[in-house]
Amino acid sequence: MKRPSQPADVKTQVLRQQGALHPHPEAVQDEVFRRGEFFDRRDLVQVRYEMLRRHQVDGQAVTEVSASFGVSRQAFYTTSAAFKNMGVSGLLPRRRGPKRAHKCTDEILDYVAQWRSDSPAAENVTKAIQKRFGVSINPRSIERALMRRKKKR
């Protein structure tokens, strides 16, 4: 049974909202994505799943699969590990790196507030933080952390 397909622009919007819109769908050169209506190269989760399936089930070499899906071998192995650890949810794109301002602790922000009340020279506060806490923080990161703290109160 064939399902009616969504208009391309609606599906693109839904994929974008879900964070699953493939940033480079033109890089996917696998045969099933070129000929079939079911397979959509814009759907990053579907592309990643099919990439892993092509290797694990069909037995294609990682280098072949990587080339046909437009990713590096490292990206293939990273995707494979995420899938093994988290299942299908591991195929969703996720933000890399720190999730919050982990250097700007409450203790450091209290220190900055005290520093500013004692001395208006803001450019030296980063050096003082480095000296006292052994942490190097960009002045803009300090400003953003202070703004977030102010909003919370």
Image: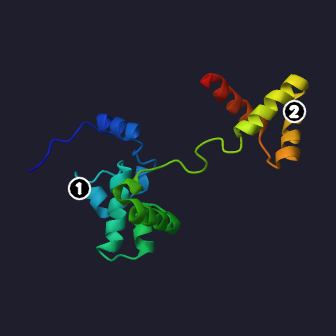
* In front of the other: 110 or 2: 110
Give the quarter of the image for residue 138.
top right
Q: Quadrant of residue 88?
A: bottom left
Query: Would you say residue 120 is visible in this rendering?
Result: no
Of badges 1 and 2, the one in the foreground is: 2
Q: Residue furthest left?
A: 1
Q: Which mark is residue 124?
A: none
Residue 131, compared with residue 124, is above or below; it is: below
- In the image, residue 117 sits, relative to residue 124, either above or below, namely above
List x then y, in percent, for residue 92. Answer: 41, 51
**Residue identifier under label 1:** 36
How many numbered circles does the render carry? 2
CA neighbours of label 1 inside 10 A, class few (<14), some (14 to 19), many (20+): few
On screen, residue 56 versus residue 121, left or right, reads left
Residue occupying image coordinates x 36% and y 41%: 15
In depth, the one of 101 and 57 nearer the eye is: 101
Q: Looking at the image, which residue is at 25% across and 36% down? A: 7
Label whose residue precedes the other's in the sequence (1 or 2) = 1
SS assignment at label 2:
helix
Real-space Cα distance between discs 1 and 2? 59 Å
Amino acid type, residue under disc 1 in the picture = Gly
Dividing the image into 4 quarters, which one contains the C terminus?
Answer: top right
Left or right for 51, reference 95: left
Residue 32 position in % (x across, y down): 27, 61
Q: Secondary structure at mark 1?
A: loop
Amino acid type at image mark 2:
Glu
What residue sits 38% from the left and 51% below the top?
44
Q: Where residue 141 sits in the image (x, y, percent)?
A: 72, 36
Residue of label 2 = 123
Whether label 1 touches label 2, CB < 8 Å: no
Crowding at dot 2, Cα within 10 Å, few <14 / some 14-19 / many 20+, comes out as few
